[in-house]
Image: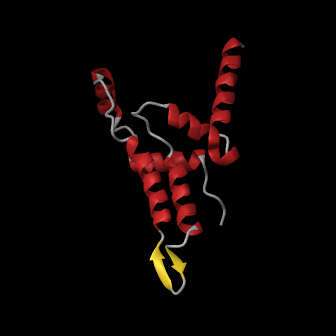
């Protein structure tokens, strides 16, 4: 019972962190406080890039001349730079020989065909 309450609290914190309100403001704020290394959810950045590209013209018209929209390029660069900051710090991973041995011993147990059938059993294809 106590463990279920603890899991519920963790779940509630995760829901709050990943809520879509205000363009995922809670997640973005939390992400900005984390020290790398970190693997952020790239879908958020890809969405930002798509909206930025779709919502801003490539050029700015001044009279009868078109100029490169440098503001759009600057904003794109800022998004890419934010992604890159998480790639600058290496992970300090340690080898775990027991796990490596286990994975090497069991990796041949399930072939692609068997795993595909298991996948369909868990999540059947939607009817067309």
Question: Taking 126 as reference, is 102 left or right?
Answer: left
Q: Nearer the viewer, residue 101 or 46?
A: 46
Task: Return the residue found at the far front.
Answer: 63
Q: Looking at the picture, does residue 81 appear above or below residue 9?
A: below
Task: Give the image location of residue 95, x and y in percent.
Answer: 28, 24
Picture quarter with the N terminus: top right
Task: Give the image location of residue 16, x and y in percent.
Answer: 68, 34
Q: Looking at the picture, does residue 12 appear above or below residue 5?
A: below
Q: Nearer the viewer, residue 93 or 58?
A: 58
Q: Residue at x 36, y 41 (%)?
A: 87
Picture quarter with the C terminus: bottom right
Q: Residue at x 45, y 63 (%)?
A: 73
Task: Return the residue found at the far bottom.
Answer: 64
Q: Hey, which quadrant is residue 36 in on the image?
A: top left
Question: Taking 8 as reference, is 100 left or right?
Answer: left
Task: Give the image location of residue 11, x and y in percent.
Answer: 66, 29
Q: Looking at the picture, does residue 24 appear above or below residue 68?
A: above
Q: Looking at the picture, does residue 94 appear above or below residue 40?
A: above
Q: Nearer the viewer, residue 14 or 82?
A: 82
């Amino acid at each position: 019972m106590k463990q279920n309450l603890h899991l519920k609290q963790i779940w509630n914190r995760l829901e709050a962190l990943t809520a879509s309100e205000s363009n995922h403001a809670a997640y973005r704020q939390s992400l900005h406080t984390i020290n790398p290394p970190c693997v952020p959810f790239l879908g958020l950045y890809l969405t930002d890039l798509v909206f930025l590209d779709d919502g801003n013209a490539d050029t700015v018209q001044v009279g009868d001349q078109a100029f490169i929209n440098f503001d759009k390029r600057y904003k794109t660069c800022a998004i890419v730079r934010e992604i890159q900051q998480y790639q600058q710090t290496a992970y300090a991973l340690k080898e775990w020989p027991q796990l490596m041995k286990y994975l090497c011993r069991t990796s041949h147990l399930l072939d692609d065909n068997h795993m595909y059938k298991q996948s369909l059993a868990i999540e059947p294809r939607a009817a067309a």
